[in-house]
Amino acid sequence: MGFTDQGARNIQLAADILGTGGLGYAVAANKVVSTTGKYATSSTNVAQNTRPNFIYNDRLQFREELARKAGIPRGVEKNPANIWGADINKIRQSFEMDGASLIIREPKIGKHSGRSAYYDIKGHKVYKEVEYHPGGGTHESSEYYKLVKNDGTQIRIINPEKPFKTGTIAPNQIYMNPQGQVIIKENNKWVKK
């Protein structure tokens, strides 16, 4: 079963549109065919060997994938610990991608070490403040992230393997490890709740 030159061009165009990387395969009658018009011997083999690693027909999916590759944390509403490891600028970009605006806030003199970066978050459905602290000062050597929800709940993401001095733990504070698991301090050690 061969195709005319125009038929082969049409199949190549369909392959390009379908995202097979322009390698000359398209779907016809639920079978994979090459630009020569011959059915491929194994559609599974063709799909595994010619399909690129990604296809984006959805702009939002494409945007999220680009953000992930750029190291911008996403899905912070569902898992606040997704910000672990990101610098404050990447965190700012994440919230801005969600339509929020961030305003840098100077720490209150005498209350903080001056090492933290604070942002007030305006227009976010879940959070109103984010802080990154590189470590040192009151909380000892461990870095941490703090998110404050619109209802006042504070979420602190810490590395439980490193020293972290909590101060007074209030009822509205939640501590998480970098994997997003809630942790509590028992017998001077952090354990999963």
Image: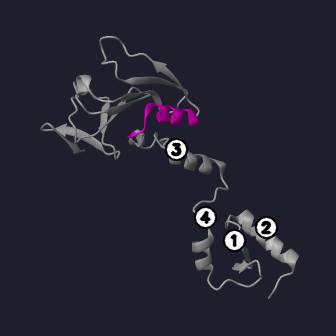
Q: Which residue is mark 3?
A: 70
Residue type, numbered disc 3: Ala
- Mark 2 or mark 1: name the one nearer the start of the chain: 2
Q: Which residue is mark 1?
A: 23
Residue 52: mark in rendering: 4
- How far apart, in angstroms, are the residues tagged by discs 1 and 3? 28 Å
Q: Residue furthest left?
A: 187
Q: Is residue 99 left or right of residue 77?
A: right
Residue 180 image point, x, y percent = 35, 45
The mark closer to the camera, 2 or 1, is 1
Q: Residue at x 32, y 33 (%)?
A: 144
Q: Which residue is mark 2?
A: 13
User: For mark 4, does the 10 Å Cα neighbourhood hold few (<14), some (14 to 19), or many (20 or more) residues?
Assistant: few
Q: Secondary structure at mark 3?
A: loop
Quadrant location, the N terminus = bottom right
Find residue 101 and report its image quarter. top right
